Amino acid sequence: MRRQSLINIFLLLIVLVLGLFVWMSPEKEEQHSLGPLTSLHSADIKRIEIRNNNGPGFVLQREADKWNMTEPYSVQANGPRIDILMDLLSTPQVEAIPLPADRLAEFGLDKPLAKVKFDNTLITFGGTHPYNYRRYVSIKDQLYLINDIFPHHVLAQAEDFISHALLPANAQISQITTPDWQIEEQDGQWLLTPLTSNITAELLQSKIDTWLHTWVSKVTKAPKTGPTGSISITLKNNQAPINFDIVKLKKQTFLIHKELGLAYRLTSDNLLLPPGNTD
C-alpha cells in the first residue's frame, strides 16, 4: 500500500476517534443529567415582568385564560409569544454552580442584559460563555449556563408582546365608519351607506367578520406621519368607539390606535375597501 494511502487512512481514524470522543464528552452527559432551569410550571404563572435596555419595562398579567399587558399599555397581549417565553422555565441546565458574588462582571451580571420575573422568581440574564456561546443566567444565589435561545424574547420591546389581533377578543361590532362607507346595525340587520345595488346581507356580514378576525403583521409605536383618513369602530356594550387613523408609510398601511398610541400594520388594504370589493 502506498505511503499516501496509509496517511489518509490514519487521518480518517483520527477523525473518527475525535468524533466518538466529542459524542461521549462529559459536557454532553452533564447536559442530559441536569434538570430544568426552574421547577415552575407555565400554567401556574400569573404575572410576568420584563426589563431590559431597549425600552420601558412591561408587565403581562394572566386573567382567566388570556394574557393582557398592564404596563406601559393596557391592551391584549400576544399569547403565543408568551407561551414560547414560558419555555425558559423548563429549559435544560448545562451547568449550575453557586453564584460568585465577587465575580459578577466575569459573567456579565454586573450590568445584566435583561431581567425577567415570573411571579416571584427573578431570572437575570448575563453574558455568553467565551467559547460555547451559551448564556449565563442567575436565580437567587445560583449561576446557570443554558442554551442561548431566548435573547430575542427577553430583549423585546413592549410592543413586541402586544396581540396582533386588531380588536379585543370576543368583541361584537355595531358600527363601522370609514371615510368612504359605513355599516351600521339596525333592528338586527346591517345597513350600508351609501347603498349599492349589488350588496347583500352576506357581503355585509362577511365584512364585519373580516374586521372581527383581522390579525396584523406587526405592532409598533405610532409614527408621526400625518393620517390620510380615520376609522371609527363601535362595539356593542361600549359607548365610546375605537378610533383609528389611517397612515400610509413606505407602501404599507397602518391603523393608528389613537388612544394607545400604537400602530397596527395591515397585511393588505382590503380591509378598508367597501363590502364586496377585494382590490
Image (cartoon, rainbow, N blue to C red):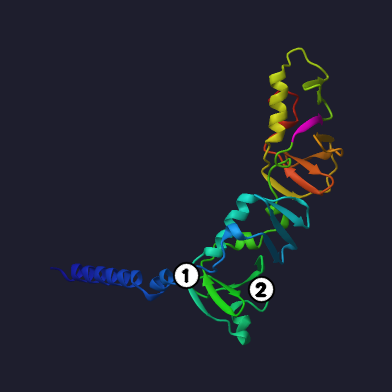
Q: How many numbered tags mark residues here? A: 2
Under mark 2, the amino acid is Pro
Label 2 vs label 1: CA separation? 24 Å
Q: Furthest-bottom residue in view?
A: 102
Q: Residue at x 73, y 54 (%)?
A: 69
The image quadrant where one finds the N terminus is bottom left
Which residue is found at the position 73% from the left and 37% from the top?
171
Q: Residue at x 81, y 37 (%)?
A: 237
Q: Residue furthest left?
A: 1
Binning the other alpha carbons within 10 Å of mark 2 as few (below 14), some (14 to 19) or many (20 upward) gives some
In which quarter of the view is residue 27 placed? bottom left
In the rendered structure, find residue 112 and report the number of the disc placed on it.
2
Whether residue 69 appears in magenta in the rendering, the answer is no
Is 3 left, or right, of 120 in this rendering? left
Q: Is residue 270 visible?
A: no
Q: Can you say whether 55 is above or below 244 in the image? A: below
